[in-house]
Amino acid sequence: MPRKKKDIDEKEFTLQDAAEIALRDYLGITSVETLLVLSDEPLRDIGLVFFEVGKRLSYEAFYCEIKPRAVNGQEPPEQIALIMQEVDVVVAPTSKSLTHTNARREASKLGVRIATMPGITKDTILRCLSADPNKILETTEKVAKSLREASTIRVTTELGTDITFPIKGRQIIKSTGILRNIGEYGNLPSGEVYLAPWEKQTNGVVVFDGSIAEIGKLKYPVKIKIEDGYGVDFEGAEEAKLLYEKLKSVGHEAFAIGEFGIGTNYKAKITGHILEDEKVLGTVHIAFGNNLTMGGKIKVALHIDGIITKPTVYLDDKPLMKEGKLLI
């Protein structure tokens, strides 16, 4: 677990400080381990900071830059996937997420600890890594415990969301950013609890009003009707059309509900960058597409999250959250 610490003054907090906390406290890298920093041109400046700090903390550090992927979940080059399997720790500040890729899964199977940082910004790093990780851990544990005891989740909002997910028997995943054990992986910064609802059984209406991955912060709500686990009707302005076209370009399985999650990071804010947005305390997120990583069965080269603000969440008709306020 990261060392105990109170909130750090962000004005005195640098990217080098954040990288050192991430590598030493969250990933637990040691002087006998090897580190791969995997980045791309848009996030080069951040990647190089992690590389410079990593050279000091690890036995050997490598920096590798790839072309930006087109969508979240697109595989890196085969040669890079092989390199990922040959080190102890991978940190991936990249434009698109590598979390839901075979490359990440295969490296994790071999014991590599992997922190993915898709679309990370300097503001997000400074804000979220200056938080007290123990507060995030405590909230995450409470939410995960409640979800483990539930069979169904229902989410409603004043904007019209009313959707029900069956979850009994599904793996409940805690993401705190603490990745110190063999084969652990997750986002960094983090703070969420998520799961794969049972395929083809989710029904209702979802209204995204926060942000959508690869689209950004929403100007207008996006309303989607869900039938038997698939998005079937999309309503809204240009952002709804963009989401529909992104899913359509990949194929039918991209319309499948792949994830439900609850944010637990009290310092995260809605910024238009999904890495931070899905961690915001008081929000929930629902994703379409690939969920193999979280124990689901949807295999498709796309994973797109949407954020819902001020939700009311019921677990088997018992309220967990009311209009964005946790009740536990």
Image: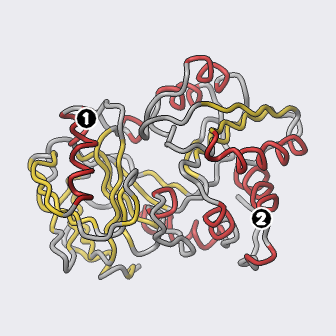
Q: Are marks 2 and 1 in contact (CB under 8 Å)?
A: no
Measure the C-alpha gap from mark 2 to mark 1.
45 Å
Q: Where is 204 relative to 179, above or below?
A: below
Residue at numbered disc 2? 3
- Looking at this view, is 310 or 110 the one in front? 310
| Number of numbered discs on residues | 2
Three-letter code, disc 2: Arg
> In screen coordinates, is 292 left or right of 89?
left
Question: Crowding near pointer 2: few (<14 within 10 Å), some, many (20+)?
Answer: few
- Looking at this view, is 195 or 39 the one in front? 39
Given the current orientation, which residue lies at the most extreme front position? 238
Indicate how the structure is coloured in the image: secondary structure
Which residue: 21% across, 59% down?
Answer: 152
Residue at numbered disc 1? 249
- Looking at this view, is 143 or 128 the one in front? 128
Is the N terminus in the top left, top right, bottom left or bottom right quadrant? bottom right
Residue 5 rendering spot, x and y as whole percentages: 76, 73
> In screen coordinates, is 185 left or right of 271?
right
Residue 282 rendering spot, x and y as whole percentages: 40, 75
Which residue: 22% across, 57% down?
Answer: 240
Q: Where is 231 relative to 3, above or below?
A: above
Q: Where is 213 relative to 5, above or below?
A: above
Q: What label does residue 6 carry, if any? A: none
Q: Secondary structure at mark 1?
A: helix
